[in-house]
């Protein structure tokens, strides 16, 4: 790959949708991902006097900068905030990384 600038892609979504969102990301060029269980800390919801935490999942992936726009556009279109998955996603720069496949590893 010409561009070796790496980005950490984080996708936060409602629990139960991670597998389908990973497939959306793969179709846009993402090679691998890690799914992390989480819970939301927003406005608490109550049911019969019991506070219920909102179950979430976080998908973490390291991607090349050259696919960033395509991946984020696909996620927005197919699993964005207006869908049941309710995805939000963002990227952050990765300065150094080891242990990644040759297609994503930053060789500075």
Image (spheres, helix red, strand yellow):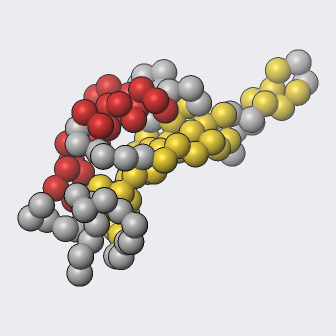
> Can you say whether 91 is above or below 99 in the image?
above
> Is the C terminus in the top left, top right, bottom left or bottom right quadrant?
bottom left
Q: Give whichever of 5, 98 is nearer the camera.
A: 98
Residue 59 point in image, percent of width and height: 47, 44
> Is residue 86 placed above or below 38 in the rendered structure?
above
Q: Residue furthest top?
A: 48
* Front position in the image: 100 or 91: 100
Q: Is residue 1 above or below residue 67?
A: below
**Foreground residue among 41 and 58:** 58
- Point 50% across, 27% down: residue: 17
Task: Give the image location of residue 35, x and y in percent.
Answer: 52, 43
Q: In the picture provided, is 87 more to the left or to the right than 50?
A: left
Q: Is residue 78 left or right of residue 34?
A: left
In the displayed orientation, state which residue is furthest to the bottom.
Answer: 108
Residue 103 in sight: yes
At x 32%, y 38%, the residue is 25
Q: Position of residue 9 (x, y in %)?
A: 38, 53
Residue 80 appears in view: no
Say which residue appears at 42% left-offset and 22% top-offset: 83
Q: Which image quadrant for residue 28?
A: top left
Question: In percent of the image, x 35 and y 31: which residue is there?
Answer: 23
Q: Is residue 64 left or right of residue 32?
A: left
**Quadrant location, the N terminus:** bottom left
**66 versus 84 height, above or below:** below
Which of the pair 76/58 is nearer the observer? 58
């Amino acid at each position: 790959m010409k561009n070796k600038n790496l980005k950490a892609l984080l996708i936060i979504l409602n629990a139960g949708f991670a597998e389908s969102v990973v497939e959306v990301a793969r179709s846009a060029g993402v090679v691998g991902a890690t799914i992390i269980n989480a819970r939301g800390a927003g406005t608490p919801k109550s049911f019969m006097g019991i506070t219920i935490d909102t179950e979430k999942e976080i998908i973490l992936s390291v991607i090349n900068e050259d696919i960033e726009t395509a991946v984020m556009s696909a996620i927005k279109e197919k699993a964005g905030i207006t869908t049941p998955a309710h995805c939000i996603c963002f990227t952050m720069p990765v300065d150094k990384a080891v242990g990644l496949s040759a297609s994503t590893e930053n060789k500075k």
